[in-house]
């Protein structure tokens, strides 16, 4: 059997690095449907999983694929799927079901230009809200945004750990440029992996949906282990029975599903920043756009301009407290994103009037360039 952890230095495409991160994190099943720009993840896992004791399944479509992922997760495996925004559309009902049933799984979204079919081979960042709010009613998820093939590996591993810890669908929200670029990727000798929370009691003493600990999540047996384990999409009590129209029972469940993630936002949220000392303007971005923003900030500093940069790594839960601190350090925040203002709306909300929030948006296809960002920075300072 082949090694799961291919430690050493590699030259990998971002999608390939994501696949290696999944295998290294203990993924046993991938189910997906071919879709640009995520297909290379499926292609690599189609041979890497079988040679490491796992399983690759091509679903009939994206809805079918996530159904398989959820079922295999309840069979005791770590599971993943990968798609683009069009596929996320089809997955939304099952994303909501996975949130209600607290099913740990990883969903990779390699964003492309849209809406609809758009330009399938071109970059975009328009799925920012879709992964967070696409399914019905109230829940919370986690979404991480890589900016390099190295982070496609690292954040895929982290996504599996977070999915297990919080029992929640966790997204790797990449984009076409990051998925298709090739760079050096260093895979370590060892990884720290989160293990699933197993029942601490025998079957006769087990209460299926009793949530304890921090974060407050139930223990999760595998189907077939001998435990009675209803997995209802209905609002359910601790025993798994329906709450029907019981307001208090529904309130207790939904607030826990939401707050187990949102209450830990400060612990979950990560960002990279630089050149913040004395900055009058901070460039805020994520993913491939952040590579241009970082270069623009460096060029601005060399030109004597007081410009810093901030790259959001955790997009959901949104890093409200971090953005508030940024807004108190600089008088202006310039959001650089490949959508028509989704990230900037959240930045403006979190800034709460502490700084002026400006937007440099492109609707995908064409990346921001450092010189373009620098020119706008000169004008607004």
Image: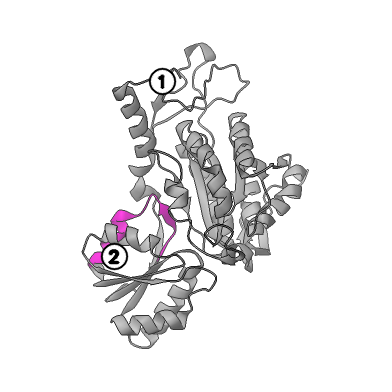
Q: In this view of the protein, can residue 25 be seen by the observer?
A: no
Residue labelled with disc 1: 238
Is label 1 in a helix, a strand or a loop?
Answer: loop
Q: In this view of the protein, can residue 83 be seen by the observer?
A: yes
Q: Position of residue 336 (x, y in %)?
A: 41, 70
Query: Bounds of the magenta span?
Result: 311-328
Above/below status of 66 relative to 191? above
Residue 323 among magenta residues: yes
Is label 2 in a helix, a strand or a loop?
Answer: helix
Residue at x 51% of width, y 73% of height:
367
Residue labelled with disc 2: 326
Q: Quadrant of residue 375?
A: bottom left
Q: Quadrant of residue 342?
A: bottom left
Q: Position of residue 161 (x, y in %)?
A: 52, 43
Q: Nearer the viewer, residue 282 or 338?
A: 338
Specify the farthest residue to the left. 353
Residue at x 21% of width, y 64% of height:
354
């Amino acid at each position: 059997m082949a090694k799961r952890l291919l430690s050493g230095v590699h030259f990998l495409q971002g999608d390939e690095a994501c696949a290696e991160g999944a295998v290294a994190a203990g993924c046993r099943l991938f189910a997906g449907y071919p879709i640009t720009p995520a297909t290379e993840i499926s292609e690599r896992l189609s041979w890497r999983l079988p040679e490491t004791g796992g399983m690759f399944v091509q679903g009939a479509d994206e809805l079918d694929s996530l159904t398989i992922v959820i079922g295999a997760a309840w069979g005791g495996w770590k599971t993943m799927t990968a798609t683009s925004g069009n596929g996320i559309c089809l997955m939304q009902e099952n994303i909501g079901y996975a949130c209600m049933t607290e099913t740990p799984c990883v969903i990779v979204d390699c964003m492309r230009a849209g809406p609809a079919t758009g330009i399938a081979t071109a970059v975009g960042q328009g799925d920012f809200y879709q992964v967070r709010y696409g399914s019905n009613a109230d829940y919370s998820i986690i979404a991480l945004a890589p900016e390099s093939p190295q982070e496609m590996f690292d954040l895929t591993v982290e996504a599996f750990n977070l999915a297990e810890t919080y029992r929640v669908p966790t997204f790797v929200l990449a984009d076409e440029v990051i998925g298709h670029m090739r760079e050096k990727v260093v895979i370590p000798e060892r990884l720290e992996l989160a293990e699933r929370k197993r029942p601490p009691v025998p079957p006769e003493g087990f209460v299926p949906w009793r949530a304890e600990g921090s974060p407050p999540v139930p223990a999760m047996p595998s189907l077939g282990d001998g435990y009675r384990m209803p997995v209802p999409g209905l609002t359910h009590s601790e025993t798994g029975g329906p709450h029907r129209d019981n307001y208090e029972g529904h309130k207790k469940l939904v607030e826990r599903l939401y707050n187990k993630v949102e209450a830990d936002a400060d612990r979950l949220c990560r960002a990279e920043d630089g050149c913040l000392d004395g900055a009058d303007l901070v460039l805020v971005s994520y993913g491939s756009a952040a590579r241009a923003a970082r270069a623009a900030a460096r060029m601005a500093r060399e030109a004597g301009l007081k410009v810093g940069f901030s790259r959001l790594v955790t997009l959901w839960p949104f890093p409200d407290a971090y953005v508030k601190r940024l807004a108190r350090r600089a008088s202006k925040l310039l959001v650089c994103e490949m959508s028509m203002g989704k990230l900037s709306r959240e930045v403006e909300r979190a800034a709460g009037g502490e700084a002026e929030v400006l937007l440099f948006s492109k609707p995908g296809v064409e990346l921001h360039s450092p010189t373009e960002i620098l020119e706008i920075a000169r004008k607004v300072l």
